[in-house]
Image (cartoon, rainbow, N blue to C red):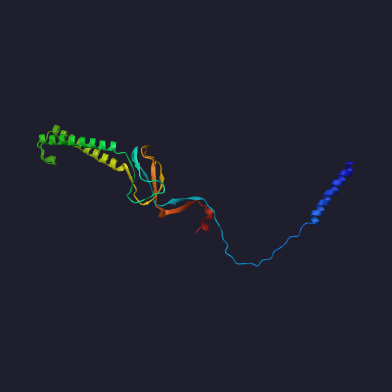
Amino acid sequence: MWKITAGLVILVTVGLGIRQIWFKPKPVYEMVAAERKDLVQTLEVSGEIAAERKVTLKFQTGGKLAWVGVKEGDLVRQWQAVASLDKSILKKNLAKFLNDYMHQRWDFDQIRENNLVTSDNYDEYSFSNAVERLIEQEQFLLNKTVLDVEIQDLTNKLATLVAPMAGVVTRVDTPVAGVNVTTTDAIEIVDPESLYFEAEIDEADIARVA
């Protein structure tokens, strides 16, 4: 019985195979005339938009943010102020250093007056070593107070961020006033006329790029 079944299976299989070969559709060929065309080679790469002219503005010291005058996408002019720290403490520090300077200035002038010094050429006078060291010490302290005032005045000026060029604001890390910022918080400005596409290309494909 099994021999008959096996024989039937073989016959059916062979019959199906012959049927597929016999009734297989013939391929259809389409004839077209040859045309002259340009051969185009496409090189796909990934990258990002960069700019030759861009600046990242950061505060030199941390502090409370007083105001932010720009947001992402805004156009800014050259030398336009874009953000500022709260200067109330900075102004008090400047006033303190100015008072220290005036105090030291009076001490310095009093030392010179006590020793009848009327010019800055000390070689004209016959000072004792103690008096000469005292005058020099007062001069050093006076110079220090002058530097303190200059540094604090510069700190006040640097508390306001100013755009060194015209462009578009592309980044504002801290857009809300009243919060504390650090020296890592930044505002970025890009010159849109200096944009370019930056991508990495394999050495083998360099010759294909124009």
Residue at 28% x, 37% y is 88
> Which x, y percent locates residue 74?
39, 49
Q: Is residue 123 left or right of residue 210?
A: left
Q: Nearer the viewer, residue 205 or 188?
A: 188
Residue at 29% x, 43% y is 157
Q: Nearer the viewer, residue 134 or 179?
A: 179
Q: Nearer the viewer, residue 123 or 177?
A: 177
Which residue ends up furthest to the left in the rendered image? 116
Q: Decide if residue 62 is in sight here.
A: no
Numbered disc total: 0
Q: Is residue 27 above or below residue 56?
A: below
Quadrant where the image shows the N terminus = top right
Q: Is residue 61 left or right of residue 124?
A: right
Q: Is residue 114 left or right of residue 94?
A: left
> Which x, y percent locates residue 29?
71, 63
Q: Is residue 50 left or right of residue 99?
A: right
